[in-house]
Amino acid sequence: MTQELKPAASVATTPEALRALISEVLAEALKQGASAAEASASVSQGLSVTVRLGNVETVEHTRDKGLGITVYFGKQSGSASTSDLGPEAIHGTVRAAASIAKYTAADEFSGLADVASLAKSIPDLDLYHPWNPGADRAIEIAAACEHAARSADARILNSEGASLSSHEGLEVYGNTNGFLGAVAATRHALSCAVVAQDDSGMQRDYWYTVARDARDLEVLESVGRQAAARAVRRLAARKLSTRETPVLYEAPVASSLLSHFVGAVRGTSLYREASFLLGQLGKPVFAPWIRIYEQPHLRKGLGSAPFDNEGVATRDRDLVRDGMLLGYVLDSYSARKLGMETTGNAGGVHNLAIEAGDDDFPALLARMHTGLLVTELIGFGVNTVTGDYSRGAAGFWVENGEIQFPVEEITIAGNLREMFRQIVAVGRDVDLRGNIRTGSILVENMTLAGS
């Protein structure tokens, strides 16, 4: 399958053309006296439509292109970017970056990734599956998805709409240490959000599906029906009194716990001494059976990447094994600041996962026996310096392993340091719709603040 985009006839859109463009930019930077340089160029196009109550609300076509360049004069650096890929604009952008570099303070930790860490080969991860359904077909799919939701239950009385998006892009990165790599990728998504209503009031919920390949998307009727079912089940929600209770995070929201972990082991947080996991490398930070790992080379993975934003080779690795913290999330700059080596995470983690146990979702409810099932989190009350955690939540109260009634207007609180150690189980109901993959997570005890 050819990796070629056509956002504009006058713009280079093939990997070969963008590689040539990057080579030209790097050569120009050296010509202007830079000791080193790195650059990336991208072109992309996409389609997004939204249908609400059977009517077309938006149809948006996007076509973008851009170039970014960073030049180094010793330990001084400057960056500039442009959306014009013409020769004059490119030369002007390099000159602008060089001019900026001459006025910046020297930083001993700046510079390109070390040659030894750069990717020597670029595996095909099967990330490029262009769809191009066309606006008419996209509208038809979104409308059918919303119709499935609205007709699923008589209590679905309103809708926030259904949306379909299809995006494809090509990006090339290169530097004067000899790296030049290209990645083409696609991303397609279908979502639906509806409102259920009865004598108790109104409740909203949603569902979505996302994939590199449109053929891997969930069936549109299923997306609509799940959105409806999730909204209806929240009707007649109650409040709870303040108490201590086990908490089961449903898989789609459980990923947020791992996001907080990533934030705490990210290089910027560590060298700024703004992390509750500072100095914990090689020490137990999770329950002793927990394993957390990266798999950057999963075919069609939403977080897959053959190299990071600095051209560093990505690789499978464990961040946590047997509850012990084994690794951080570092780019070259933060690694140098910490006296360590880059972990290939410039730009973030790649398909981060927590190892699932044997329990399916009903088994997790049974294991919890009595407690709170969280299906929605609200707000951002998380302090990564201290680990203090407090977030608004909604979900369901569970007794004897069975869901009893929906709950809302509550807050769950704890400290991430303790919460990580109190993870009792991770379900095998793994949510694969993102860069962080996890099943539902059961935490032994948290404070529930209610009425």
Image (tube, helix red, strand yellow):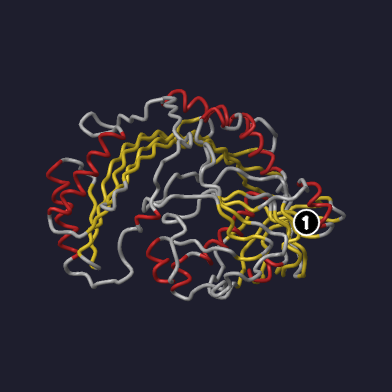
Residue drawn where x is 65% and y is 48% of the image? 203
Q: Is 317 positioned to the left or the right of 9 in the image?
A: right
Q: Is 139 positioned to the left or the right of 193 in the image?
A: left
| In the depicted structure, whether residue 185 falls above or below residue 235 | above
Q: Residue 340's quadrant in the figure?
A: bottom left
Residue drawn where x is 77% and y is 70% of the image? 243
Given residues 343 and 199, the one toward you in this image is 343
Which amino acid type corresponds to the residue marked 1 in the rendered image? Trp
Dot 1, crowdedness within 10 Å: few (<14), some or many (≥20)?
many
Whole-percent x, y for residue 394 in the image: 67, 56
Given residues 164 and 90, the one toward you in this image is 90
Whether residue 162 is visible, yes or no, is no
Whole-percent x, y for residue 50 in the image: 47, 35
Disc 1: which residue: 397
Q: Residue furthest right?
A: 400
Q: Quadrant of the C terminus?
A: bottom right
Q: Quadrant of the N terminus?
A: top left
Q: Is 342 positioned to the left or the right of 426 in the image?
A: left
Whole-percent x, y for residue 413 in the image: 66, 69
Q: Residue furthest front?
A: 116
Residue drawn where x is 36% and y is 53% of the image? 310
| In the depicted structure, whether residue 168 falls above or below residue 236 | above
| In the depicted structure, whether residue 285 falls above or below residue 217 | below
Whether residue 184 is visible, yes or no, is yes
Given residues 283 and 450, the one toward you in this image is 283
Whole-percent x, y for residue 152 in the image: 68, 32
